[in-house]
């Protein structure tokens, strides 16, 4: 008997939900609901308007900030050399003039969607957002470090504006900082904090810095360069626990030190954790979309339901590098990818089919070291090192079967542009000639 009652209640609830969605849809259904006021979300809205997409757009974010640029959070914003207003993507007037409703501070917890792509999104505040088409530009969240003391005040992450504000608020009263994670974010923030006069120690669990993004030679270059600039960098090292302050025997809630697994104790009034990110796939999973280290999309940014687009950090896509195998997939975390992938999604939403094909590129500014990466070095079988110590330039070219496939360039923008252009045009840079650092790469580029 109870089973039948539950079934009847569930059916009634489903019918009521469907009727509510239908009623809302008739009232004020936006042409496109973009969930995620990120770089990719902003670019999607802007690209759609450039392509003549005339329907109303709702751009919805869960932060109480206008859409902003994130790369500066670990550098210029943290150091106080740029103001928050300069990071804003577009003015309020822009959104109003282009018929885009910017919604801040709404966290979507559930989406009811029909087979034709329309539906209703429900926020944690109880508001409902009906739509004809849906875009997920929800990005990724910081990976948490779950050890003793992880909830202490002063144990921080740096993923969004609120994280950056929380970090800035503590910097003045701190002298010792421990950064956990030797990736881009960790090294950028560590360099900034050191420049601000802090004693900074970087703990990297792996055997080298930036292990997922660059080759061994570039990793070693950064290790030596940062150590020469005064950063205390410890490889193959991890934290065992965070130690709280103690006052008269009574434990307080703020962090005072980090205990390493070998028993070493490092003083720290700030612990900044940067150990990677996790794509925000919760809504996609709730919708029944295929998820595998991100929302699985095709070359047109379409998810498995054929109507939803997923763009940027959250999307697991076919490798966009020309010549990649049919089963070669990748999830990219970069500004360039967020922009270019959003353009492809905009084409899809306007009925065009433009495949995402291009050369990924990345950058990272760490103190006076400007790293620019062109291409992906996966599967390389040869490297060529170009180093000009007098001018502070360093480049590693990566080759596969004699063909250049990528480059790491430090303070060498001409090398970066030469490799980026060669890859985009399907050209090559002969390894033998490239080994001379005095040779301009663009003068020896070969091929069509």
Image: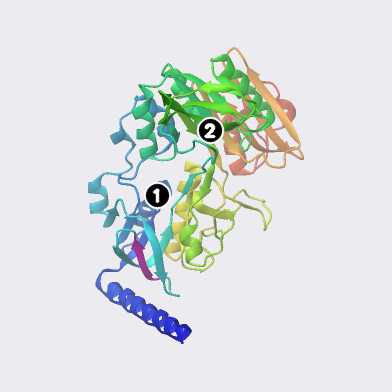
Span colored in magenta: 118-123
215 shown above or below 268: below
9 shown above or below 330: below
Q: Which residue corresponds to the image point at 60% horizontal and 32% vertical from the top-left? A: 210
Please identify the quarter of the rendering in which residue 125 is found: bottom left
130 shown above or below 301: below
Farthest front residue in view: 249
Q: Which residue is mark 2?
A: 184
Task: Give yes or no for residue 31 being in the magenta stretch.
Answer: no
Rendered location of residue 86, percent (x, y): 31, 34
Scheme of colours in the image: rainbow
Farthest top residue in view: 390
Rendered location of residue 440, percent (x, y): 61, 24
Q: Which residue corresponds to the image point at 37% horizontal and 50% vertical from the top-left? A: 37
Q: Nearer the viewer, residue 176 or 66?
A: 176
Q: Residues within 10 Å of mark 1 (few under 14, many from 20)?
A: many
Viewport quadrant of the C terminus: top right
Q: Residues within 10 Å of mark 2 (few under 14, many from 20)?
A: many
Q: Which residue corresponds to the image point at 57% horizontal and 49% vertical from the top-left? A: 331
Measure how far apart labels 1 and 2 are at the Cα level. 23 Å
In the rendered structure, which disc, 1 or 2, sits on the residue that comes first in sequence? 1
Q: Which residue is mark 1?
A: 43
């Amino acid at each position: 008997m109870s089973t039948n009652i539950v079934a009847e209640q569930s059916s009634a609830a489903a019918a009521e939900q469907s009727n509510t969605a239908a009623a809302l849809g008739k009232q004020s259904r936006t042409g496109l609901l973009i969930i995620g006021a990120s770089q990719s979300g902003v670019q999607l809205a802007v690209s759609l308007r450039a392509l003549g997409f005339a329907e109303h757009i709702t751009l919805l974010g869960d932060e109480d900030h206008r859409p902003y640029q994130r790369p500066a959070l670990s550098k210029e914003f943290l150091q106080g050399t740029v103001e928050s207003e300069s990071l804003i993507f577009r003015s309020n007037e822009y959104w109003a003039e282009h018929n885009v409703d910017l919604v801040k501070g709404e966290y979507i917890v559930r989406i009811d969607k029909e087979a034709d792509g329309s539906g209703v999104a429900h926020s944690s505040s109880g508001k409902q957002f009906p739509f004809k088409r849906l875009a997920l530009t929800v990005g990724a969240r910081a990976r948490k470090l779950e050890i003793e003391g992880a909830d202490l005040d002063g144990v921080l992450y740096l993923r969004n504006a609120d994280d950056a504000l929380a970090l800035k608020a503590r910097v003045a009263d701190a002298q010792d900082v421990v950064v956990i994670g030797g990736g881009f974010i960790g090294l950028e923030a560590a360099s900034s904090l050191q420049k601000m006069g802090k004693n900074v120690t970087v703990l990297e669990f792996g055997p080298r810095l930036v292990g997922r993004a660059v080759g061994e030679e570039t990793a070693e270059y950064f290790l030596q360069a940062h150590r020469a600039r005064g950063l205390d960098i410890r490889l193959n090292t991890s934290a065992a626990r965070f130690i709280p302050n103690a006052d008269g025997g009574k434990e307080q809630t703020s962090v005072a030190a980090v205990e390493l697994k070998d028993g070493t104790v490092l003083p720290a009034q700030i612990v900044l954790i940067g150990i990677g990110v996790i794509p925000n796939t919760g809504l996609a999973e709730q919708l029944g979309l295929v998820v595998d280290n991100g929302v699985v999309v095709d070359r047109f940014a379409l998810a498995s339901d054929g109507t939803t687009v997923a763009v940027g950090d959250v999307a697991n896509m076919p490798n966009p590098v020309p010549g990649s195998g049919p089963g070669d997939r990748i999830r990219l975390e970069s500004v360039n990818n967020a922009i270019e992938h959003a353009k492809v999604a905009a084409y899809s939403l306007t009925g065009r089919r433009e495949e995402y094909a291009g050369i990924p590129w990345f950058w990272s500014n760490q103190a006076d070291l400007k790293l620019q990466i062109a291409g992906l070095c996966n599967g390389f079988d040869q490297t060529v090192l170009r180093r000009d110590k007098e001018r502070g330039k360093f480049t590693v070219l990566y080759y596969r079967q004699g063909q250049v496939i990528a480059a790491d360039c430090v303070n060498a923008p001409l090398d970066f542009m030469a490799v980026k252009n060669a890859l985009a045009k399907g050209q090559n840079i002969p390894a033998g000639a490239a080994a001379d650092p005095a040779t301009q790469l663009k003068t020896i580029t070969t091929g069509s």
